Amino acid sequence: MSFTHAHQAAMAQQRNRGRCLHHDNGARCDAIISAHSIQKGGQLNLIAEQGHVYRLTADLTTLRSTGGKVQLKKAGINKVSTFRGMCKDHDNKLFAPIDDSPLKFDHEQIALYAYRSICREYFVKENAARSLEAMINHPDVPQASRQLLLDSTQGQNSGFQHLQRHKLIYDAALSEQSFADFRFLVFWSSSPCAIQASGLLFPDYDFLGRQLQDLGPETEALDLLTFFTAPTDHGWAYVLAWHQSSDQTCQWVRDSLQEGICQGRKLEDMLLRLSLACENHAIRISWWDKLTPSAQHAGLTALSVGTDPNVGIPSDYLASGCEGLADWIFDSVQDGAGN
Ligand SMILES: [Zn+2]
């Protein structure tokens, strides 16, 4: 088996290795399901055209075949954003308040959306770490690739350890129903929606390009921000949410958004950049196809942030780029971030 095929096989094996990431998981979690991290009914259907959306393809194998360039690929919504990270019983019970009801200004709903994005990322990061480890010792790995794999593994493991810490914080908050510990900003919209997303990041730079946290290996604890779109009674919403333990950095992010608006930056542009920088998203096909080539180029640049471990993150990736591309408009904002 060639190196590339072996890597694909290792990734697929991890993807299919279902397990329940519910905070109360145990021996009874046997029926693992393939669940959508971006809801199919309320979210993907809102932007799907003939049952399809665009999504990013940026795995190691694809990147190698395209010379390191990320691409958008058409995908059926049944397969987009799914992960085998929870058993049927836990998934149904835990997420009923968000799967069965549109988003309101509700701490529990926000906590559940944030938790789902953490569980999905945890599943993906753990898979990546395990398949990279399996590949390093593969006999056909060329020496040059081995070093790349070693570097990637180091980065993956460090990111995964940070994520594990936050997963435990969220596990405890959810199991104790401490929903008031979650802070958030909700941007309500009744306009068309070009992107659905469910992601998270350890904020490194704010919306003005100022450094917030050093993501280097020496930093012991990193604050975590989640963000996601959600269906509402009158359209949809874009939400930034975090646990209070990440208040310090996330409040800076929030303040920089406000400062950016005061300086004349558009909220729609800033949230578009954030959405494109997260790889768990779905894009409306007709919106993307109607963009001019230079706009698409700007979009692909934003999409490629963080996909290549050899290319550093530009400090202004949330501060500039993609101006005027978004066709969404936000009607109002509600702040659940006060102490
Ligand atoms: Zn379970």
Image (cartoon, rainbow, N blue to C red):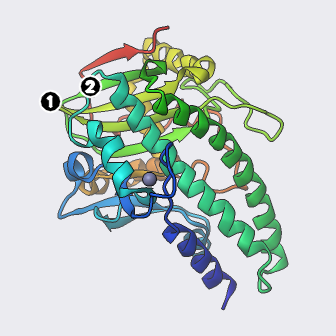
Number of marks present in the image shown: 2
Identify the residue at image location x=73%, y=59%.
Answer: 152
**Residue at the extreme bottom:** 1
Which numbered disc flags the more N-terminal residue, 2 or 1? 2
Q: Measured from the top left, where is residue 245 in percent x and y? A: 60, 22
Q: Does label 2 point to a residue whose CB lies under 8 Å from ligand 1?
A: no
Q: Are marks 2 and 1 in contact (CB under 8 Å)?
A: yes
Q: Measured from the top left, where is residue 158 in percent x and y? A: 74, 47
Identify the residue at image location x=50%, y=8%.
Answer: 339
244 left or right, relative to 191: right
Q: Nearer the viewer, residue 194 or 79?
A: 79
Q: Measured from the top left, where is residue 136 in percent x and y? A: 78, 73
Amino acid beneath label 2: Trp
Mark linked to residue 197:
none
Mark linked to residue 188:
2
**Residue at the extreme front:** 27
Rounded to the nearest whole Å, what is the CA distance between mark 2 and mark 1? 9 Å
- Secondary structure found at label 2: strand
- Secondary structure found at label 1: loop
What residue is disc 1 on? 234
Residue count near mark 2 (Cα–Cα under 10 Å), binned few <14, some 14–19, many ≥20: many
Report the quarter where the N terminus lies. bottom right
Q: Nearer the viewer, residue 280 or 27?
A: 27
Position of residue 325 relative to residue 291, above or below, is: above
Is residue 322 visible in the rendered image? The answer is no
